[in-house]
Image (cartoon, rainbow, N blue to C red):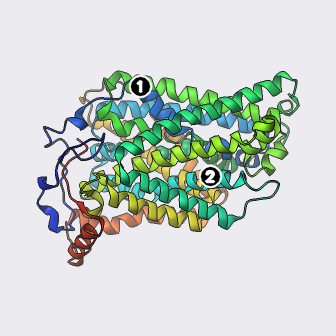
Amino acid sequence: TTSANGSFGAEGPETETDSSGTGGMRKSLERKGSAPNDAVHLQRRVGLFSGVALIVGTMIGSGIFVSPSGLLVRTGSVGVSFIIWLACGLLSLLGALAYAELGTMNTSSGAEWAYFMDAFGPAPAFLFSWVSTLVLKPSQMAIICLSFAQYAVEAFVTECDPPTSVVKMVALLAIVMILFVNCYSVNLGMAVQNIFTAAKLVAVLIVICGGAWKLFQGNTQHLSNAFSGDTPTLGAVATAFYTGLWAYDGWNNLNYVTEEIKNPSKNLPRSIMIGIPLVTLCYALINISYLAAMSPTEMIDSEAVAVTFGNRILGALAWLMPLSVTVSTFGSANGTLFAAGRLCFAASREGHLMDILSYVHVRRLTPAPGLIFHSLIAAAMVLYGTIGSLIDFFSFTAWIFYGGAMLALIVMRFTKPNYPRPYKVPIIIPVVVLVISIYLVVAPIIDTPRIEYLYALLFILGGLIFYVPFVKLGMTPRFMNKVTLFFQLLLEVVPTSSMFE
Ligand code: ARG
């Protein structure tokens, strides 16, 4: 098998004779073996510039075009919401710096999975891969596709809310298109990613320039008296953080490709220190731009802030705004599915999910089963969820694990004091992020208990029901062989060994 792509398939299907599909949970926890000729993977292609692009390109997606109104509702004043925007940027930066230590210390793929494995052992690592493949990655995908659809439909209906059913259909269509792109070829997926990232930066620039122009004309009235309004409760602040942190999510993305970074001990921390402040600056300026064009009340009422902004400022070019946002969200969704496929692939290869999910297409060399699996869950979330509820649910669950990674760092300072740490953060950083993540998870539960939070917790722990028999004891139900075989024939996929070394 020849490989023309960046991530999958330098090795042929013949490398493993497991193709009858043991269906079982192979416990191949060796992470460094094999593939001496797998030069594609060992190549370190990501330099400082691409590192920054990877972070910025993932972080800027739908959030900044959708969340500002939600944040205003939850905080009740322009000033508090602006502070929260900045605080989210700072928190992401601190979290990412701690991840830089983890990523340079343990340079294998799998990000959190690998760190949990080192610090806490296989059960918590399993719970992470369980939740991220079944919930976190698909809900990211669903949220971004819903935002995509919201903007795509908004462009055609003026002065009334777009019908929900149409938005959902368009979101499903987006999922199918992105699924197709990524099943078709890895190169195509990467090309889509690069083109769309560039377009997204143009969108950001348009908003900032438009706002600057308005301010220059003297439209500063909405920026004065920023703190008039009720003081929000602690729980409301935490959920406001959820909304803001969604826009910043993706700050840990470079940790998934540590093995491909040139000189990671320098470039990983540097990309973080350039990328995240850059995004924070963009977001702060965009927020000011919005307020230069509309009042806080208008912002809250607007279903799609960026479109309202375009209508006010761009005149005949107003159509540019929904177009650039759809382009930006489409790119983000593409990148999310790309990463999700990888994660699903890695987790199932480690024996943490069904074998079939780690198989790749015979000719296209794409991890089709994993991608299809994710898309199906994302589609269900699109049908049954709304952007707001999904974001809360996502952030709540995600921050449990981000906090867990901070704890892993702290624990390993004591249990593995002699591990090489080319980049070391002051211990206070993970401690602060850990405390904040505990607050972010606990405060909304205490303030406004919602059944969804309980579901999320039960779901995480429910993973243990699968972990004990299938992973720990290595049992395999008989019918799994048949299931695996069926899907192998249907999707034309075959097992392959360690592609992510
Ligand atoms: N921050 C992005 C947005 O505002 C979402 C990123 C999703 N996260 C990820 N790791 N792909 O839409």
Residue 267, position as x, y percentages in the image: 38, 23
> Residue at point 53% right, 29% down?
276
- Between 354 and 190, which is closer to the camera in this rendering? 190
- Identify the mark nearer the N-term, 2 or 1: 2
Residue 325, position as x, y percentages in the image: 63, 43
Mark 2 Cα-neighbour bin, 10 Å: few <14, some 14–19, many ≥20: many
The quarter holding residue 472 reads bottom left
Mark 1 Cα-neighbour bin, 10 Å: few <14, some 14–19, many ≥20: many
Residue 242, position as x, y percentages in the image: 61, 47
- Position of residue 237 relative to residue 478, above or below, is above
In the picture, measured across the screen, residue 359 lies left or right of residue 452, that is left
Q: Secondary structure at mark 2?
A: helix
> Circle 2 is placed at which residue position?
147
> Residue at point 77% right, 40% down?
309
> Circle 1 is placed at which residue position?
269
> Residue at point 81% right, 32% down?
292
- Between 240 and 53, which is closer to the camera in this rendering? 53
Whether residue 422 is visible here, answered yes or no, is: yes
Look at the numbered disc 2 and say if its residue's Cβ is closer than 8 Å to ligand 1. Answer: yes
